[in-house]
Image (spheres, helix red, strand yellow):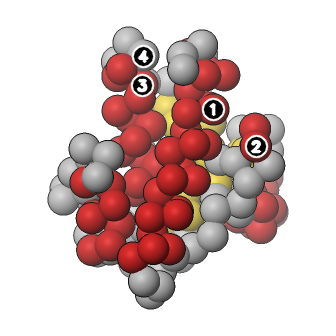
Amino acid sequence: MFRNILIVCVGNICRSPIGEYLMRERALEAGQDAVRVSSAGLGALVDHGAEPNAVQVAAGLGLDLGPHKARQLDDAMLRESDLVLVMERWQQQEIERKYPFARGRVHLLGKWNELEIEDPYKKPLPFFEKTCDDIEECIGLWCEKLWKTV
Protein backbone atom coordinates (compact mmCIF):
# COMPACT_ATOMS: atom_id res chain seq x y z
CA MET A 1 0.00 0.00 0.00
CA PHE A 2 1.27 3.44 -0.90
CA ARG A 3 0.96 5.67 2.19
CA ASN A 4 3.31 8.51 1.17
CA ILE A 5 3.08 9.88 -2.35
CA LEU A 6 5.41 12.62 -3.56
CA ILE A 7 4.73 14.56 -6.75
CA VAL A 8 7.69 16.31 -8.37
CA CYS A 9 8.23 18.90 -11.08
CA VAL A 10 10.89 21.59 -11.49
CA GLY A 11 9.87 24.72 -9.59
CA ASN A 12 7.10 23.25 -7.42
CA ILE A 13 4.84 26.18 -8.26
CA CYS A 14 2.82 24.94 -11.27
CA ARG A 15 2.44 21.25 -12.07
CA SER A 16 3.33 19.44 -8.85
CA PRO A 17 1.10 21.57 -6.58
CA ILE A 18 -1.88 20.90 -8.88
CA GLY A 19 -1.00 17.20 -8.81
CA GLU A 20 -0.51 17.18 -5.04
CA TYR A 21 -3.80 18.85 -4.19
CA LEU A 22 -5.74 16.84 -6.77
CA MET A 23 -4.23 13.49 -5.68
CA ARG A 24 -4.96 14.34 -2.03
CA GLU A 25 -8.58 15.14 -2.91
CA ARG A 26 -9.00 11.96 -4.96
CA ALA A 27 -7.45 9.85 -2.18
CA LEU A 28 -9.96 11.24 0.32
CA GLU A 29 -12.81 10.61 -2.12
CA ALA A 30 -11.60 6.99 -2.41
CA GLY A 31 -11.64 6.63 1.39
CA GLN A 32 -7.84 6.64 1.59
CA ASP A 33 -7.55 9.12 4.48
CA ALA A 34 -4.25 7.59 5.67
CA VAL A 35 -2.52 8.49 2.40
CA ARG A 36 -0.19 11.47 2.67
CA VAL A 37 0.44 13.43 -0.55
CA SER A 38 3.09 16.13 -0.88
CA SER A 39 5.09 17.82 -3.62
CA ALA A 40 8.55 19.22 -4.25
CA GLY A 41 10.73 20.56 -7.05
CA LEU A 42 14.06 19.62 -8.55
CA GLY A 43 14.89 23.33 -8.74
CA ALA A 44 12.20 24.68 -6.44
CA LEU A 45 11.42 28.32 -5.98
CA VAL A 46 11.54 27.66 -2.24
CA ASP A 47 8.75 29.25 -0.18
CA HIS A 48 7.04 30.74 -3.24
CA GLY A 49 3.32 30.21 -3.54
CA ALA A 50 1.74 28.52 -6.51
CA GLU A 51 1.86 30.45 -9.79
CA PRO A 52 -1.32 32.57 -10.23
CA ASN A 53 -2.41 30.72 -13.39
CA ALA A 54 -1.96 27.40 -11.57
CA VAL A 55 -4.09 28.74 -8.71
CA GLN A 56 -6.76 29.78 -11.21
CA VAL A 57 -6.98 26.47 -13.08
CA ALA A 58 -6.89 24.46 -9.83
CA ALA A 59 -9.79 26.55 -8.52
CA GLY A 60 -11.76 25.32 -11.54
CA LEU A 61 -11.41 21.83 -10.03
CA GLY A 62 -12.46 23.09 -6.60
CA LEU A 63 -8.89 23.09 -5.28
CA ASP A 64 -7.40 25.92 -3.21
CA LEU A 65 -3.64 26.17 -3.79
CA GLY A 66 -3.46 29.22 -1.51
CA PRO A 67 -1.61 27.45 1.32
CA HIS A 68 1.04 25.95 -0.99
CA LYS A 69 4.72 26.85 -0.45
CA ALA A 70 7.36 25.45 -2.82
CA ARG A 71 9.89 22.96 -1.39
CA GLN A 72 13.19 21.69 -2.72
CA LEU A 73 13.36 17.94 -3.24
CA ASP A 74 15.76 16.28 -0.81
CA ASP A 75 16.99 12.91 0.37
CA ALA A 76 14.61 12.72 3.36
CA MET A 77 11.51 13.36 1.24
CA LEU A 78 12.46 10.56 -1.12
CA ARG A 79 13.30 8.14 1.70
CA GLU A 80 9.86 8.56 3.27
CA SER A 81 7.98 8.32 -0.05
CA ASP A 82 6.51 5.02 -1.24
CA LEU A 83 5.67 6.44 -4.67
CA VAL A 84 7.26 9.40 -6.48
CA LEU A 85 5.46 10.76 -9.53
CA VAL A 86 7.26 13.06 -11.98
CA MET A 87 6.01 15.08 -14.94
CA GLU A 88 8.75 14.30 -17.48
CA ARG A 89 11.06 11.34 -18.12
CA TRP A 90 14.21 13.41 -17.63
CA GLN A 91 13.04 14.16 -14.08
CA GLN A 92 12.81 10.45 -13.30
CA GLN A 93 16.30 9.93 -14.72
CA GLU A 94 17.68 12.85 -12.70
CA ILE A 95 16.17 11.63 -9.43
CA GLU A 96 17.37 8.08 -10.00
CA ARG A 97 20.86 9.32 -10.90
CA LYS A 98 21.15 11.58 -7.87
CA TYR A 99 19.29 9.28 -5.44
CA PRO A 100 19.87 5.66 -6.57
CA PHE A 101 17.98 4.29 -3.55
CA ALA A 102 14.76 5.75 -5.01
CA ARG A 103 14.85 3.51 -8.11
CA GLY A 104 11.69 1.48 -8.48
CA ARG A 105 9.60 4.09 -6.65
CA VAL A 106 9.90 6.89 -9.23
CA HIS A 107 7.39 6.84 -12.08
CA LEU A 108 6.04 9.16 -14.71
CA LEU A 109 2.71 10.67 -13.69
CA GLY A 110 1.60 9.89 -17.25
CA LYS A 111 2.86 6.29 -17.07
CA TRP A 112 -0.52 4.70 -17.86
CA ASN A 113 -1.20 6.86 -20.91
CA GLU A 114 2.44 7.46 -21.92
CA LEU A 115 2.13 11.20 -21.38
CA GLU A 116 4.75 13.71 -20.36
CA ILE A 117 3.29 16.88 -18.89
CA GLU A 118 4.93 20.02 -20.27
CA ASP A 119 5.91 22.88 -18.00
CA PRO A 120 3.48 25.79 -18.48
CA TYR A 121 5.63 28.23 -16.47
CA LYS A 122 5.58 31.76 -17.94
CA LYS A 123 3.09 30.70 -20.61
CA PRO A 124 -0.47 31.99 -21.12
CA LEU A 125 -3.50 30.58 -19.31
CA PRO A 126 -4.48 28.09 -22.08
CA PHE A 127 -1.21 26.19 -21.46
CA PHE A 128 -2.11 25.93 -17.77
CA GLU A 129 -5.59 24.69 -18.67
CA LYS A 130 -4.08 21.97 -20.87
CA THR A 131 -1.59 21.08 -18.14
CA CYS A 132 -4.37 20.85 -15.56
CA ASP A 133 -6.46 18.64 -17.86
CA ASP A 134 -3.47 16.33 -18.42
CA ILE A 135 -2.71 16.13 -14.70
CA GLU A 136 -6.35 15.39 -13.92
CA GLU A 137 -6.42 12.58 -16.49
CA CYS A 138 -3.17 11.05 -15.20
CA ILE A 139 -4.19 11.30 -11.53
CA GLY A 140 -7.45 9.56 -12.42
CA LEU A 141 -5.55 6.67 -13.98
CA TRP A 142 -3.23 6.36 -10.97
CA CYS A 143 -6.20 6.40 -8.57
CA GLU A 144 -7.87 3.69 -10.61
CA LYS A 145 -4.73 1.54 -10.40
CA LEU A 146 -3.99 2.29 -6.73
CA TRP A 147 -7.48 2.20 -5.25
CA LYS A 148 -9.67 0.68 -7.97
CA THR A 149 -11.61 3.93 -8.36
CA VAL A 150 -12.94 5.70 -11.42
* Residue occupying image coordinates x 76% and y 43%: 113
Regarding residue 58, the answer to whether it shows in the image is: yes
Q: What SS does tag 4 mark?
A: loop
What separation in Å lies between label 3 and label 1 (alpha carbons)? Answer: 12 Å
* Residue occupying image coordinates x 77% and y 67%: 90
What separation in Å lies between label 4 and label 3 (alpha carbons)? Answer: 5 Å
Along the horizontal axis of the image, is 21 left or right of 80? left
Q: What SS does tag 3 mark?
A: helix
Identify residue type, mark 2. Answer: Asn
What separation in Å lies between label 2 and label 3 (alpha carbons)? Answer: 20 Å
Q: Earlier in the sequence, mark 1 or mark 2?
A: 2
Crowding near the residue tagged with mark 2, few <14, some 14–19, many ≥20 C-alpha atoms within 10 Å: few
Q: Earlier in the sequence, mark 2 or mark 3?
A: 3
Q: What SS does tag 1 mark?
A: helix
Identify residue type, mark 3. Answer: Ala
Report which residue position mark 4 lands on. Answer: 30
Report which residue position mark 3 lands on. Answer: 27
What's the mark number on residue 113?
2
Crowding near the residue tagged with mark 3, few <14, some 14–19, many ≥20 C-alpha atoms within 10 Å: many
The residue sitting at the bottom extreme is 122
Identify residue type, mark 4. Answer: Ala
What's the mark number on residue 141?
1
